[in-house]
Image (cartoon, rainbow, N blue to C red):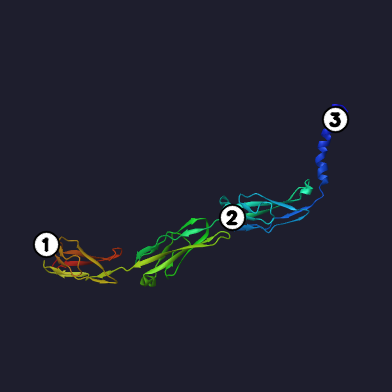
Amino acid sequence: MNTLKKLICIILISMQAPFAWSQDCTAHFEAEAGPDIDVCEGGTVVFGSTMGGDATEAVWKGGKGFFEPNRNTLNAEYTPSEDETGTTVVLTLEASNHKFSSCPAAKSSIKLTVNSIVVVNAGDDIRVCAGNTVHLRGAVTQGKAKSTAWITNGSGTFDDVHRLDAIYTPSKDDIEKAALSIMLTAEPFGVCLPDSNTLIVMIDAVPMVTITPDIYVENLNPINLTARIVGGSGEIQWSSSGTGTFENPGRKDAVYNPSAADMKNGSINLSVFVSSINGRCNSKKQAKLHFAGK
């Protein structure tokens, strides 16, 4: 056979070879990776996989995580890697038999959803004055939450329990007890555990002050003033819209000495300001000083 004929013969044989090999595949492989699975960040998945037919060997393809003991174990344990958190990983089981190397492996895939752990922070403890609302500033500091909600052991009301910046209005009972707790809860996606964080709200009493609203005088004689604090204790401070002077303006029973300009104006305002001992809560009342004949 000359060289040209030999070359043609080799080409024909090589073209027919794949067809011949495919005809030699008599094995039947089966593979079932199992149902799709959700796992939480840092968790481990145990596969309930099966193979059948003539398959005797299995290998897992895909994923950046760790297979225990290895990828060639049918029911291996899989631990997702950190960068797979928040993603869906596709893992494929391939079943075969090396005795039938010409036969294609059976394949079955599973979707592994790796959910992230959710962490919330309710914020720092809050101190407010009685009668004021509580402005909350919660945050999801890790992962993604399916939903968030505020709950309390108090009896007040939220404008919207699902808003991280909700506003809480203390009840009368809350004010009387002077303290309550508010918890921020978060529901995660998938199979991760919910999270919660609590803050304390302290409610300071507001010292109220009462004085006679209208005072009538006929001359420039010193005027004895009296203020009364109710609902707690506090510090007093008197002031005037006029140009007169006070004796002991920090006392409840202060004395005011009106000026000639005060009398000429016909009336002036006297104000008493009371603040709580810690200086956080205060109230104010005003009286009008009338000069006779004006």
Name the residue: 18% across, 67% down.
289
Name the residue: 81% across, 44% down.
22
Dot 1: few (<14), some (14–19), or many (≥20) neighbours within 10 Å?
A: few
Dot 3: few (<14), some (14–19), or many (≥20) neighbours within 10 Å?
A: few
Amino acid type, residue under disc 3 in the picture: Lys
Nearest the eye: 220 or 110: 110
Label 3 secondary element:
helix
Residue at the front extreme of this rendering: 69
Q: Is residue 223 visible?
A: yes
Q: CA distance from mark 3 to mark 2?
A: 59 Å
**Quadrant holding the N terminus:** top right
Dot 2: few (<14), some (14–19), or many (≥20) neighbours within 10 Å?
A: many
Residue 43's disc is: none
Label 2 secondary element:
strand
Q: Position of residue 204 (x, y in %)?
A: 33, 67
Q: Which residue is mark 3?
A: 6
Residue depth check, mark 3 versus mark 1: number of the one nearer the observer: 3
Nearest the eye: 284 or 176: 176
Contact (Cβ within 8 Å) of mark 2 with mark 1: no
Name the residue: 17% across, 64% down.
267
Residue 260's disc is: 1
**Quadrant holding the C terminus:** bottom left
